[in-house]
Image (tube, helix red, strand yellow):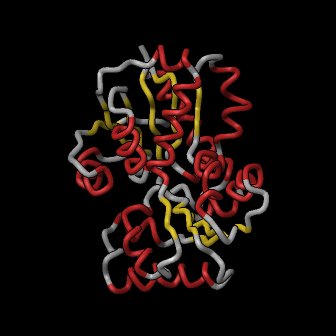
Amino acid sequence: MAKIGVFDSGYGGLTVLKELRNKLPEYDYIYLGDNARTPYGNRSFETVYQFTLQAVKKLFEMDCELVILACNTASAKALRQIQQKDLPLISDTKRVLGVIRPSAEILGEFSKTKHVGILATEGTVASESYLIELNKFFPELMVFQEACPIWVPLIENNLHSSEAGKQLIEMHLKQLLEKSDKIDCILLGCTHYPLIQETISSFLPSNVAVLSQGEIVANSLKDYLERHEQMKKVLSKKGSILFYTTDDPQSFENKATVFYGEGVVCEQMRLA
């Protein structure tokens, strides 16, 4: 019986894992955070691909049949290559899914003006993955992106509630809205950002909806499993969860509570 692997460059994927367990609590999960090499957002496509592939292979070795890349940067820079180039050579039954496509499949449904915004890391914005995916499902959408490179370190160092932190959050929101005053829906294209969703909303007009990815990805995975009966059958259902980090376990445990909403027990794992 197999588990569901959830991978992120650090802590942000815990916000996705939290919603996965809320929606699909019966399954067994393994979470892996590559905290020793985070952040991924400013790394090259090749580096992110290599790091992500190492993590995916490790999760496969640990009996994960399905791996969720709960990281927008990894989904943007590595998912397609892993799916098309590596997975056929590794296994004809294992699967790797990301967070960008599920978000793109429904984003247009929340906008009346057809002007939407994406807040994300530099790497995700540079990849233009959201532009490509959204064009498949909602070609009529006007999509405006804003890279927010300082937000992840702000959140991880608990500085987002400071006055300086709030000013940096407000600055990027102003820059996004200056690109179009018709934006009525904004997607948080980084799994760290749900932690500052209330602050983000406080700086936006009341008519602008803000969407985070956790619930979207959880609903998408539930639908995926309903449509792929064979995968659903092989996944074990004991409701267990294991946490791993490539960095210091104690440090991970201390910060993980903020993202996951409850305490975790973590072990260290080396990828390289």
Residue depicted at x 78% and y 62%: 140
Residue that appears at 76% across and 55% down: 135
Q: Nearer the viewer, residue 270 or 253?
A: 253
Is residue 9 found left or right of 252 in the rendered image?
right
The number of numbered badges drawn on the structure is 0
Question: Horizontal and vertical percent for residue 202?
Answer: 40, 79
Q: Is residue 170 above or below residue 253?
A: below
Residue in the image at 48% along x and 41% along y: 219
- Residue 144 visible, this angle: no
Residue 224 at x, y percent in the picture: 56, 31
Which quadrant is the N terminus positioned in? top left
Could you tell me residue 87's position as x and y percent?
Answer: 66, 26
Can residue 79 be seen from the camera position used here? yes
> Residue at point 67% right, 72% down?
113
User: In front: 22, or 170?
Assistant: 22
Residue 248 image offset from top left, x and y in percent: 30, 47
